[in-house]
Image: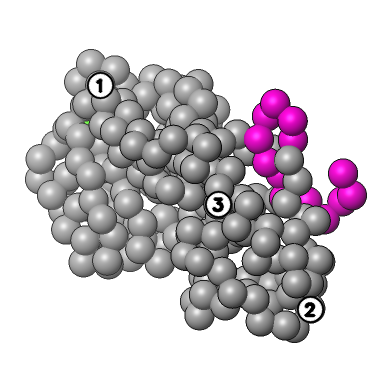
Amino acid sequence: MSATILVVEDEPSIQELIAASLQHAGHLVLRADSAEAALQLVNDTLPDVVLLDWMLPGLSGIQCAQRLRAAERTRDLPIIMLTARGAEHDKVAGLEAGADDYLTKPFSPRELLARIKAVLRRRAPQMTEDCVDVDGLRVDPVSHRVHGNGQSLELGPTEFRLLHFFMTHAERVHSRAQLLDQVWGDHIFVEERTVDVHIRRLRAALEATGHDRLIQTVRGSGYRFSAQPE
Ligand code: CA
């Protein structure tokens, strides 16, 4: 499981140490040495996880977490707070600000990687390699195979990612902009009607086993993957 991870840390030696162990584990690392730089950076590239130092010059890690949670684009971005503090009330404050987890310095690279994996599994299940089954439709992210009632279905790579995202985020309405962020990786250079084109292809690919019924259009809002009838 390789993820794009934003490291927000003002201490150069710690930032370097964290970045090196993440890269060694196969992750792509983005770096910022302040909350302001981090907020700017996520406008261009949406990471899969943010490692956020508590004590930063300017905006604090807590304030940064609150801002990420308040913006639609970054509302669901997994955040792990990093801090030298170990006090229980600090931990509570971090979690209340919207952090998903909390690591007290010093921590081992192994512990950091384990926490990242756990947070991704929880917050971004499409990042994991587990098979997903819904109503007879099965997606295997390792082999990139899709089966409907045991029958093999052919999907293009974008339709595959779209279906995998839908199945790991079922019963929720996703706007076209959200789908572009989550499935295409970024929304900047792709027009929203591109989503409609790929939804059409995805439905056509699922028609053979009737699973196209699971992809529902929500008028004025976007799309929903649901096993419940519309
Ligand atoms: Ca610091």
Distance in Å between CA atoms under marks 3 and 1: 36 Å
Determine contact: label 2, label 1, CB under 8 Å: no
State the mark number for residue 104.
Answer: none
The residue to which callout 2 is attached is 149
The answer, for residue 86, to whether it is visible in the render is: no
Sequence-wise first label, 2 or 1: 1
106 to 89, vertically: above or below? below
Q: Which is more foreground, mark 2 or mark 1?
A: 2
Check disc 3 and give the amino acid type.
His
**How far across and down, in percent of the image, does residue 206 sit?**
70, 66
**How far across and down, in percent of the image, does residue 193 sit?**
52, 37
Check disc 1 and give the amino acid type.
Glu
Bounds of the magenta segment: 218-230
Image label count: 3
State the mark number for residue 198.
Answer: 3
The residue to which callout 1 is attached is 36
Q: Residue at x 16, y 58 (%)?
A: 20
